[in-house]
Amino acid sequence: EAQVTQNPRYLITVTGKKLTVTCSQNMNHEYMSWYRQDPGLGLRQIYYSMNVEVTDKGDVPEGYKVSRKEKRNFPLILESPSPNQTSLYFCASSRQGGNTEAFFGQGTRLTVV
Amino acid sequence: AQSVTQPDIHITVSEGASLELRCNYSYGATPYLFWYVQSPGQGLQLLLKYFSGDTLVQGIKGFEAEFKRSQSSFNLRKPSVHWSDAAEYFCAVGAGNDYKLSFGAGTTVTVRA
């Protein structure tokens, strides 16, 4: 089954404690991205990757890091989380980019206290 | 850069009634347009997409959308809603060259019996 898998689904952490949210896709897609969803703001792109070792900033990259060492994996790293990063996070993959269908993971609900 | 506006934050509709969700986009070239649906606690699922050709596109779950270039709109419609259509709906515009998918703020649909 084609899918994008995120882990964990729910996470509560404290300010400043480094965390990683994993994302993996089994569709051999070249393009992967991370979004955060906040009420009234829709989905905003954090980072995206066009292929292995190729990443770039989206609209709201501050406080986040990513890496793309393998085609299937695209982890999101919060080096020093802060309460304003409390949000619902989605990973997505697509064959190319904004001109092809994106497949989304189930989401990660992050709370930073 | 592209942008998407969904003017309606929340719509309530009776089961069996028709539904129309509005979407306006801003983009200088030919847009790639999408509608996604997010059921409670779930990721986003593609309802339909427009790339080119016939301006009336059919999607899953009985939804359709019409692209109107003169109005920069891509409104979503369903002739008769079911209780299971209660969800949040996102319009998105994709730009092929910079691989960016931009989302509207979303419209929440409530279906009353």
Image: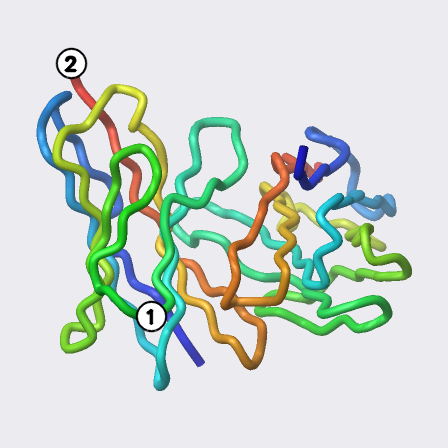
Please tell me which residue is depicted at 79% across the width and 38% down the height of the picture.
A14
- Mark carried by residue B89: none
Q: Secondary structure at mark 1?
A: loop
On screen, residue B55 versus residue A9, left or right, reads left
On screen, residue B43 versus residue B70, left or right, reads right
Vertically, is A55 above or below A35? Answer: below
| Image quadrant assignment for residue A8 | top right
Please tell me which residue is depicted at 18% across the width and 45% down the height of the picture.
B77
Q: Chain of mark 2?
A: B
Q: Is residue B66 visible?
A: yes
The residue carrying mark 2 is: B113
The residue under label 1 is which amino acid type? Ser
The residue carrying mark 1 is: B52
Classed neighbour count for the residue bearing mark 1: other residues with Cα under 10 Å, few (<14), some (14–19), many (≥20): few
**Image quarter (top left, top right, bottom left or bottom right) of the C terminus of chain A:** top right
The chosen color scheme is rainbow
